[in-house]
Structures are given as structure tokens and as C-alpha cells.
Image: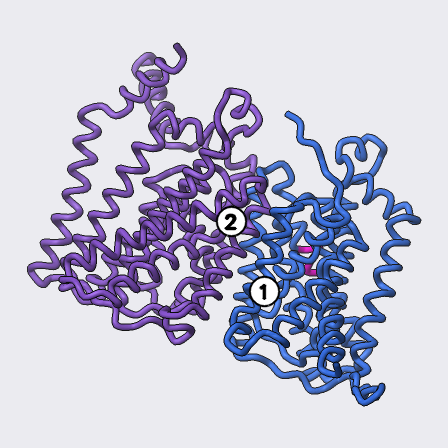
Chain colours: A blue, B purple
């Protein structure tokens, strides 16, 4: 039972980080109609920014957090302007290949700058742990889950209540009509990328606080699983991203925790298997809506 | 009626002389390489490069069928390659036939298994397209790789060793080259046939193609099966060439590398894929110092090719400076001069 609960909490943790990343995918997919393959690598860059500012620049911790989020958001903005914006009218396959290129570019720049060895963080959030009925739960777990909840609620309010948020909804519904209503499409898409990448920055902080390591490939696999979460919950839906992320996180923790030794080597395979089953059975996800295709 | 016109166009496309030139090029390259190999004028590294070029060309050509002609992005090509390599080399390792039978058997087993994998995967993802299809093929590729690690008989993470090697590099090259030619013939025949035109119609507009009575699902599966069979054959050649294979030989990075070949060579351009595959295999070998920057260059090339292809300035540039236009301008100038004189 104790093992079960701590595995569950581990899964909730992992799932909360997935949920934050999934949100970024989901927003960008909903508005720019593209799978931003490089989103996972933004997290990696954010984590390296955090690593450098903590271990080498030795800045105060709150400043490093801010720096991490700002760098991630700027990266998202710049990537969109340079690589994706010229391709607004291109075929989806061209955009997708470009996004893969950007993802590869970020990974390999990190590889050249920091080397392929895993960098270890010095512990920067010393929170201790809480003892409940014989199980010790690290405080960081509560911080991660709490942050995720606050961000979800905040984002939901932002999109439903503010002018910019409503503009985003309009753009995702129909670009041409939104433009006719006087919405600046380019600006809206830029804002979406900035918010999505800032969330990736926050995910980078939470990820680093929990796992204490970063390497150039941190983001790619993580990102793909988070995309699986976004699809699972229904692309474009905020509660969907949250539920999808948590389900995938818990499922992953359970499979790595309970499968017999040999099979855990294939645990990544299981996460992908869920993605495939989900996409085949219900491509629109739990909370997604179906679009009708016309000529 | 319209069909007849297209057919006659196609026929005139491959006239006797151009077919002859193609055969001459094919035979010429083979004669040149084998002459160099047999007279011992080729260094060891070039000998192995020539075989590596062959199986990479097969990979690039087969992926081009999916990406360039069907218009769907598959990021799991390395998965089919892995299925072929593992099935074929397990046949060769665990059987005790004479060498010749083992190689041929391995190719058949590898091609068949990869084909079955291609059939199962493609028929399960018919509903998907675009980004979702790309991510699912990526997932299938990774699933194949992670299950190879735990299946019995594959050697697990340590890899499968003891695969018989080709009797000599020359035999290996001849074998691989023969399969490159076979691949080209299969693809050319397919693409220039009625079925090939149906596939390009699906790429250009799915809904219109469907309205013309083209069975989209059947063609999608057919294309995936052909591409995965060919990738499987490439995998078998690879495993006989390397004699030891491990799951990390078939990672997602390889799928991207094949995609880079297809994109640089031009999607839907077979000759381009061949040249690009050759360049991508040879260049890193020549520029050993650039090894660290190889992947970085792929990334930059991918982005650059896509941005340049979509840029309106490219169309202007081609309008002004393509060789044909320049030639016309020159001729016109010549005419004017002669007129004024």
C-alpha cells in the first residue's frame, strides 16, 4: 500500500509536468494548427539556462527562475518569427519538417555547448518532506502539483475573460473570420507561442527541481510523451491537457513501478502504445471536438 | 480518353535513347566501382562506403515513396528497417544452410516481416493524417525498438552478433547494387503506372481523389507496404554488412537522417534521393573534422530547404536566373546583334 501511494504521488508529479508541457503543445496546435516539435527542446534549453544561472552565475534562486521563464519565452517567440512565420501558407508537411529541423537544431547546439554528459544540479529547492502515516512525501511534490493547478486555473480565466484570450479562441476557430473582426493574427500567434514557451520554462524548473539533471535529449522524449498527453485529453482543451498529462504520468509510474524487471526496459514503448491506441480509437481525445472537413 | 493521353505522354517520356542512357549510367557505375575494387585500387573505407551508399539509397528511395509521392510524413522508417534487419539476421544466425541460401533466405524473411509490419501498422492508422500520422509512425518506430530490447533471440540491448558477413566486399557491393537497381525498377514501374498516378492524386487532393473513385485506404496501405518491404531489404543488407546489430542502430535519429536525404534530394524526385543519399553518406566521411557538427548541419539544411522552397523570392530567382532562361536571353541578345548589324 505504501509503495502504491508513493508510486501514485510520483505519477501525479510526473503527470503535472507533462500537463504543463501538454498545455503548450495544445495551445500552439489549436491556434497555429501545427505540431511544434521543438516545444520539448524549449524545456531543455530552459533547464540549461537554469543550470547555468544557478551553478555558474550563482544568482539568487528567484532570479534564476525568472531568467529561465524569460529565456524560454523569448526562444519560443524567436523560433516562431524566424522559422514558422514564413511558412504560414505552406503545406503542413513543410511546416512539420521545419519544426523537426528546429528541434534538431536546439538539441545539437546544446550538445556542442554543454557536451553530451548529463549535468547535475546542486539542490536548489530544499523543502524537506512530509510524513503522513509512515509514508514520507517530499514537499516538492506538493509544490509541483499546486503550481500546475494554479496555472491551469489562471490560464482558463485568461482565455475566457481577457480580450487577448478571446482573440486566441477566435483565431483557433477561424483565422480569416478573426482577421475580418480586426484581430491581429500574427500578434495573437506570437502571444500563444510566448505563453506556451513560458509554461515550458516553468515545466523546466519543476522538472529540474525534481530530477536534478539535464542533458541535450531531456526535452525530446519528454516532449513527445507530453504531446501524447495533449492528444489524450483532446488537443486545444485546457482541462484535457491536465487530465491527459496526469493519466499518462500515473500510467508511466505504475508501469515502471510494477512491471517485472525485464519489461521496464520497454516502458517508453508502453507510453507510445497508449498514444497510438488513443489516436486510433478517438483521435479527438477526451475533451476534443470533431471538425468536419470540406473541399 | 484522358487516360490514353496521359499514357501516350508517359510513353514518349521514356524514349529509346533516354532508356539506353540510363542503362549505360547504371552499368557504367557498376563497372567503374567493381573495376576499382577488383584491381585493388579502392581503399577499404571506400569499399565499405560503396555498400553503405547502396542501402542508404534504398532507404531514401523507399521513404520518398511515402513522403514525396503519397505526401504523408513517416518518422518511423527506421522501425521497418529494424524489423527487416532483425528478422533477416535472426534467420541467418539461427539456421544452418549454405551461405548463399542464408543470404537469399534472410532477404526474403526480412522483406516479408517488414512488409507484414508495414501492413499491420499502416492499416491501423488509416484514419490519421498529417501531424498525427507523423507522431504515430514515430511512436511505432520507438515501440519496435523498445520491444526488440525485450524479445527473446534478438540479443537485447547488447545487440545481435554473429551475423554472417558477405564473402567479400565485392560480393557485398554487387549484392547491394543489385537491390538498388531492383528498388529503382520497382519504384519507377509503380510510379509511372495507373496506381502511381492515383497515389500522387491522393497527395494533391484527398477529397477529389476519393471522388474520382480512388480507393484511398488501399493505396495508402500499398505504398506503406512497398516502402517497408524495401526498407526491410535495406536492413538485411545493413546487418550482413555490419555483422552485428543493436537497437540503437535504428533510433529516431536514423529516421530523421533518411528524411533529410529525401528533403535535400527533393520530395518526389527519385534521382535526387539517390544523389542526396550518396552525398550524406560520403561527406561526413570526407570531413571527419566536421563529425561533431554533422547533426547540426542536418538541422540547418532541413530548415533552410523548407524556408527557401516556400519563399516567394525563390520563384523570382528561378524566373530570372535558371539556366534555361539565361540561355534564352543569350540567344535573344545574339539575334538582336545580328539584326542591328
Label 1 secondary element: helix
Q: Quadrant of residue B35?
A: bottom left
Q: Position of residue B248 (x, y in %)?
A: 42, 68
Residue A243 seen: yes
Identify the residue at image location x=60%, y=62%. A271
Q: Which residue is mark 1?
A: A221
Label 2 secondary element: helix
Chain on which label 1 sits: A
Decide if residue A85 is on the left or right side of residue B46: right
Looking at the rendered structure, whether the residues under marks 2 and 1 are on a common chain is answered as: no
Identify the residue at image location x=70%, y=48%. A29
- The one of B173 and B81 positioned closer to us in this rendering: B81
- Whole-number angstrom distance, CA of label 2 to CA of label 1: 25 Å
Q: Which residue is mark 2?
A: B304
The residue positioned farthest toward the right in the image shown: A161
Q: Position of residue B69 (x, y in %)?
A: 43, 36
Q: Quadrant of residue A214?
A: bottom right
Identify the residue at image location x=62%, y=63%. A41
Res. B91 mark: none
The residue positioned farthest toward the left in the image shown: B39
Residue B282 seen: no
Magenta range: A74-78
- The one of B28 and A294 positioned closer to us in this rendering: A294
Decide if residue B62 is on the left or right side of residue A81: left
Amino acid at each position: 500500500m505504501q509503495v502504491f501511494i508513493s508510486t501514485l504521488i510520483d505519477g501525479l508529479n510526473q503527470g503535472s509536468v507533462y500537463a504543463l508541457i501538454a498545455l503548450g503543445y495544445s495551445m500552439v496546435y489549436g491556434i497555429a494548427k501545427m505540431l511544434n516539435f521543438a516545444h520539448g527542446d524549449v524545456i531543455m534549453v530552459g533547464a540549461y539556462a537554469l543550470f547555468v544561472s544557478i551553478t555558474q552565475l550563482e544568482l539568487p534562486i528567484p532570479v534564476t527562475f525568472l531568467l529561465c521563464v524569460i529565456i524560454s519565452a523569448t526562444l519560443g517567440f524567436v523560433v516562431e518569427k524566424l522559422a514558422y512565420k514564413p511558412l504560414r501558407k505552406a503545406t503542413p508537411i513543410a511546416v512539420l519538417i521545419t519544426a523537426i529541423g528546429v528541434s534538431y537544431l536546439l538539441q545539437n547546439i546544446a550538445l556542442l555547448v554543454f557536451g553530451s554528459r548529463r549535468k547535475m544540479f546542486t539542490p536548489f529547492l530544499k523543502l524537506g518532506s512530509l510524513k503522513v502515516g509512515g509514508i514520507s512525501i517530499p514537499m516538492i511534490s506538493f509544490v509541483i502539483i499546486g503550481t500546475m493547478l494554479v496555472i491551469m486555473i489562471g490560464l482558463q480565466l485568461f482565455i475566457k475573460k481577457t480580450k487577448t484570450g478571446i482573440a486566441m479562441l477566435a483565431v483557433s476557430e477561424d483565422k480569416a473570420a478573426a482577421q475580418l473582426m480586426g484581430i491581429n493574427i500574427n500578434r495573437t500567434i506570437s502571444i500563444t507561442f510566448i505563453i506556451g514557451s513560458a509554461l515550458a520554462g516553468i515545466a523546466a524548473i519543476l522538472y529540474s527541481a525534481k530530477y536534478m539533471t539535464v542533458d541535450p535529449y531531456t526535452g525530446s522524449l519528454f516532449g513527445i510523451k507530453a504531446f501524447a498527453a495533449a492528444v489524450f485529453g483532446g488537443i486545444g482543451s485546457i482541462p484535457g491537457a491536465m487530465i491527459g498529462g496526469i493519466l499518462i504520468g500515473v500510467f508511466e509510474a505504475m508501469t515502471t513501478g510494477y512491471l517485472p524487471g525485464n519489461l521496464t526496459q520497454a516502458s517508453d514503448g508502453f507510453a507510445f502504445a497508449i498514444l497510438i491506441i488513443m489516436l486510433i480509437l478517438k483521435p479527438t481525445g477526451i475533451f476534443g471536438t470533431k471538425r468536419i472537413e470540406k473541399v | 480518353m484522358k487516360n490514353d493521353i496521359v499514357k501516350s505522354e508517359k510513353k514518349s517520356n521514356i524514349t529509346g535513347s533516354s532508356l539506353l542512357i540510363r542503362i549505360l549510367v547504371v552499368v557504367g557505375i557498376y563497372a567503374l566501382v567493381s573495376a576499382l575494387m577488383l584491381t585493388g585500387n579502392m581503399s577499404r573505407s571506400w569499399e565499405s562506403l560503396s555498400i553503405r551508399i547502396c542501402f542508404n539509397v534504398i532507404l531514401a528511395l523507399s521513404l520518398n515513396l511515402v513522403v514525396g509521392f503519397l505526401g504523408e510524413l513517416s518518422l518511423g522508417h527506421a522501425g521497418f528497417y529494424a524489423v527487416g534487419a532483425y528478422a533477416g539476421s535472426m534467420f541467418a544466425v539461427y539456421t544452418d544452410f549454405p551461405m548463399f541460401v542464408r543470404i537469399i533466405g534472410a532477404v526474403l524473411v526480412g522483406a516479408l516481416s517488414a512488409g507484414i509490419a508495414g501492413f499491420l501498422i499502416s492499416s491501423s492508422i488509416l484514419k490519421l493524417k498529417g501531424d498525427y500520422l507523423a507522431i504515430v509512425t514515430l511512436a511505432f518506430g520507438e515501440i519496435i525498438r523498445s520491444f526488440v530490447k525485450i524479445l527473446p533471440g534478438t540479443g537485447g540491448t547488447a545487440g545481435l552478433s554473429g551475423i554472417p558477413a558477405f564473402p567479400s566486399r565485392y560480393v557485398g557491393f554487387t549484392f547491394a547494387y543489385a537491390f538498388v537497381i531492383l528498388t529503382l525498377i520497382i519504384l519507377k514501374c509503380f510510379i509511372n503506372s495507373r496506381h502511381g498516378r492515383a497515389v500522387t492524386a491522393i497527395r494533391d487532393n484527398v477529397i477529389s481523389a476519393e471522388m474520382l473513385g480512388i480507393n484511398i485506404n488501399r493505396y495508402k496501405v500499398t505504398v506503406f507496404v512497398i516502402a517497408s518491404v524495401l526498407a526491410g531489404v535495406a536492413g538485411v543488407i545493413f546487418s550482413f554488412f555490419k555483422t552485428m546489430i543493436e537497437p540503437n542502430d535504428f533510433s529516431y535519429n536514423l529516421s530523421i537522417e533518411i528524411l533529410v536525404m529525401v528533403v535535400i534530394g527533393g520530395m518526389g524526385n527519385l534521382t535526387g534521393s539517390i544523389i542526396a543519399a550518396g552525398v550524406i553518406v560520403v561527406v561526413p566521411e570526407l570531413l571527419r573534422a566536421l563529425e561533431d557538427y554533422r547533426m547540426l548541419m542536418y538541422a540547418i539544411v532541413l530548415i533552410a530547404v523548407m524556408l527557401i522552397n516556400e519563399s516567394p523570392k525563390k520563384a523570382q530567382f528561378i524566373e530570372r536566373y535558371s539556366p534555361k532562361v539565361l540561355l534564352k536571353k543569350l540567344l535573344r541578345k545574339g539575334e538582336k546583334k545580328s539584326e542591328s548589324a
